[in-house]
Image (cartoon, rainbow, N blue to C red):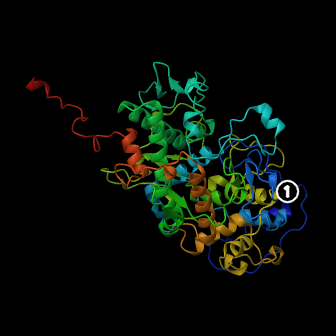
Amino acid sequence: MFSAASAGLLSVLPMGTRSASAAPALKVPSQVVKPAVLGPATGHGVGNPRGAEVALKMRSQQGRFGLMFPSLQPFAPSEALLAVMAQRMIDPRQPLADVSSSEDGFDNAEMPAGYTYLGQFMDHDITHDITPLSLQKADPLALKNFNTPFFDLSSVYGRGQAEDPQLYDPKDPALLLVATTAEGISDVPRTGAGTAIIGDGRNDENLIVSQMHLAFLKLHNHFVGLGNSFADARRLVRWHYQWVIVNDFLPRMVGPELVTAMLLHQSHGTIKVDNKFYKPGNRQKPMIPLEFSVCAYRFGHSMIRAEYEMHDNTTFPLFGPPGQDLRGSRPLPYDARADWSYFFDIPGVEPPMGRNTTRLLDTQLSFPLANLPPTVVSHIDGAIYALAHRNLLRGVKLGLPAGQDVAKALGVPPIPNTRLGLYEPEWGNKAPLWFYILKEAELQGGRQLGPVGGRIIAEVILGLLSLDPDSYLNSRIRWTPADPAFGMGELFKMSGATFKTEENLTEEELPEEELPEDHL
């Protein structure tokens, strides 16, 4: 934590696109009364996963994690400087009572908000760690004992029917277990205490991701219902999910041109990925680069809204009074059930007026992320509750290089600090990689990532898919969904998880009209 004098400097010099104009450099406090601490954390993207400290021991070492650019030097600005930057990254606007009253210039109209949470779901999938505790203790840097980071939906299927039978329907183990709440709506299965019985408990951290998880349970059961075996249904779910990642999620985030350029269709049916920078030493158990996992992939934090409209005229804050916000770890409330047309483009359903979009990709984070609740970060003495501050400090503690150094390594002209809005000489003409990636996106309009952030994201996601021998990219028989335009909206529709209202029900699903009593 910083002294009161230091804290008084933190409201100066907003850095986002919504600030007035460039201002002269401010004086940065040099004395830190007590070192800032991250503190215990359980929420998505706020804690250090096992093995993340590997680069501090040996920069060329690879295990569960590693470095994409091990030859680059760590960038270590002072904690005081990071605290000033983090405070400037807070958007002070409070959550809205109605999403439809959101301001122009605040939202990314081209990006439905559901992709923020698809990104979170994907992160959980590749970082799912079910290594036994005894092996974790014996291998704290996760050099040998860790799960392969593939997009294989281990967060949904767990370790399979034999080792995780609680995830499967006891009446028909080919089906995944789906529950029904007391109010008659579908939910993930739960214990009597409300704990989710799912492959990865992190998917129950918020009510949006838990309902997305539910859609994957339903999609699997849909394929089984068509007569597929368990193995074939699982393969179809995985391949449709991977197709969405490659053809829907990634083009929106990094641009379709980069994705197309990196996919090389082979004559025998497989699709090769042209990776130039992500080259893990162990291709059977590839590492996840720290530049990706604790930095570039956290671009999604900039997209998070302070509030979401779950269905017509029903808006919930991200964090609020217990039971009245979107935090999970509880049975799905009836009022919080998701009409997915508010989050994705659903075929055959007209987008509603108040549809949620993501925030622009920039250096401003929504106000609730400035003070994470105790359910996300333990409120202990000296702990940091602001997500931006945690991300910046983590980058230093894990030895990440500066943004300009990574740009040079990628062959991209680096953006000088003056254009990034960093005028303090203490920066040494360099910027933290996470901030650099967000500012790079902001400077080009905030609709998608720039060349540094986009390249890191595309290299790792496509690289992991190419290294998975069971991914659709490696199928000898070229596979596509029945509709090659298949995206996340089509996935929800196919799963049967779309919201049912009289406006979007088919004629067969509409309730029969009752005749007035005088006509009976």
| Residue at the disc numbered 1 | 58
- Please tell me in which quadrant of the rendered image residue 303 appears: bottom right
Residue at image point 61% right, 48% down: 123
Using the rendered image of the protein, determine whether residue 88 is visible from the camera's viewpoint: no
Image coords of residue 185 (percent x, y): 42, 31
| Quadrant in which residue 470 is drawn | top right
Horizontal side of 10 relative to 210 (left or right) equals right
Q: Quadrant of the C terminus?
A: top left
Amino acid type of the residue that numbered disc 1 sits on in the rendered structure = Met
At 60% from the left and 71% from the top, the residue drawn is 451
Q: Position of residue 202 (x, y in %)?
A: 62, 39
Q: Residue at x 74, y 71 (%)?
A: 431
The answer to whether residue 78 is above or below residue 127 is below
Q: Position of residue 276 (x, y in %)?
A: 63, 67
The foreground one among 134 and 315 is 134
Res. 39 in view: yes
The x and y percentages for residue 10 are 76, 65
